[in-house]
Amino acid sequence: MPNADDIAWFKQQFSTQINAGLTGTPFDVDMLTAIACQETGEVWPILRKKLPVDRVVALCVGDTIDFQGPGKGRQAFPRTKDALLAVPNGDEMFDVARKALDDMSVFIKSYQGAASNPNKFCHGYGVFQRDIQFFKDDPDYFLQRRYENFPDTLAQCLGELKRGLAKRGFQNRTSLTDFEFATVAIAYNRGSYNADKGLKQGFFDGEKFYGERIFDFVTLSRSVGAAAASAAPLMAGRYVVMARGGLKLRGGPGTNFDAERTLSAGAELNVIASPGIDPAWAHVDLEGDGLLDGFVFASFLAPVGANGQGNAPAPN
């Protein structure tokens, strides 16, 4: 399960992007961090120590439980491999789902048993876990592997949480208590909330229910202060892009600024010292002429080594 160090890392990497998406909602970074801890907390705390951030996000998949009878195991579509193969593009989706399991299980030992069964595949996708039951309604999200992009998986999570707000009658609220948020998360997890049961609702892991875990994770996340979670600004100097799919150059320090172009993996640039700028972002000069070209997300940069090649950043 994620600990305080894991949560500090998560905030370092994603707080800026999360905050950009929270406008007009009663949620905060600690609440979204709690969802990530509960949904994929068995995956990213391990991956973060071995892989660059973009790869960590891409491998945040899970849930291989199949139908085991009425009221047991998976009840939603697709209950089994055969059920998935029976729908349009189901064979293509199975290939995606199976590869996701194979790739993730290389690093997560608890999934290696499932990976040894050729009929098993992942049912949950993205840091915040969008369920494969939505494949029928939104096949492109899964087939195009949009869950591998943090802003996309965040947007899906916020959409589901907003539906949870409506089910709780909180859609006009500008703030929530942590208990109220946990009840919204229960609706996010199971589709409804029963006030008589309090937080003892949602998936039961053998010790606690989903609602209880969410409340605990929010509490833990709030204990990780801003100082511990703040990314240190990059020193001025020469850096290389380490994002496998490229890195967006934006007009300002935030995802709310338009992307002007995408810098390819391996591209080199100069980081310019810019006091007062959010340290999660780097102010860069692409041409080496002292002129500023825009901002990139700092976590995807690594110092250029003496041999001119980038050195992968050490995990936090």
Image: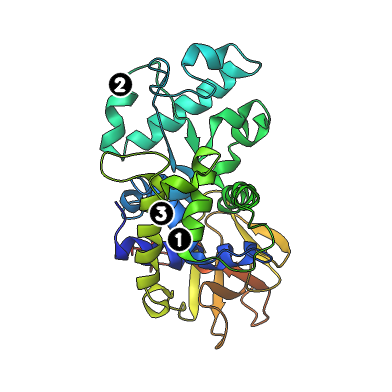
In the displayed structure image, the side of residue 208 where residue 274 appears, left or right: right
Please provide percent x and percent y for residue 93.
Answer: 56, 23
Seen in the picture, residue 300 relative to 86 is either above or below; the reply is below
The answer to which of 169 and 258 lies nearer the viewer is 169
User: SS for tag 3?
Assistant: helix
Please provide percent x and percent y for residue 16.
Answer: 55, 68
User: SS for tag 1?
Assistant: helix
Please provide percent x and percent y for residue 164.
Answer: 59, 48
Give the residue drawn at x 61%, y 76%: 288
* Label located before the other in sequence (3 or 1): 1
Give the CA separation, mark 3 to mark 1. Answer: 9 Å
Are the residues flagged by discs 1 and 2 in contact, CB closer than 8 Å? Answer: no
The answer to which of 83 and 199 lies nearer the viewer is 199
Q: Which mark is residue 214?
A: 3
Amino acid residing under circle 3: Ile
Residue 283 seen: yes
Seen in the picture, residue 23 relative to 41 is either above or below; the reply is below
The quarter of the image holding the C terminus is bottom left
Residue 286 seen: no
Please provide percent x and percent y for residue 21.
Answer: 63, 61
Give the residue drawn at x 31%, y 65%: 4
User: SS for tag 2?
Assistant: loop
Give the residue drawn at x 27%, y 26%: 113
Give the CA separation, mark 2 to mark 3. Answer: 31 Å
Q: How many marks?
A: 3
Q: Residues within 10 Å of mark 2 (few under 14, many from 20)?
A: few
Q: Residues within 10 Å of mark 1 (few under 14, many from 20)?
A: some
Amino acid residing under circle 1: Phe
Which of pointers 3 and 1 indicates the residue nearer the eye?
Answer: 1
Circle 1 residue: 179
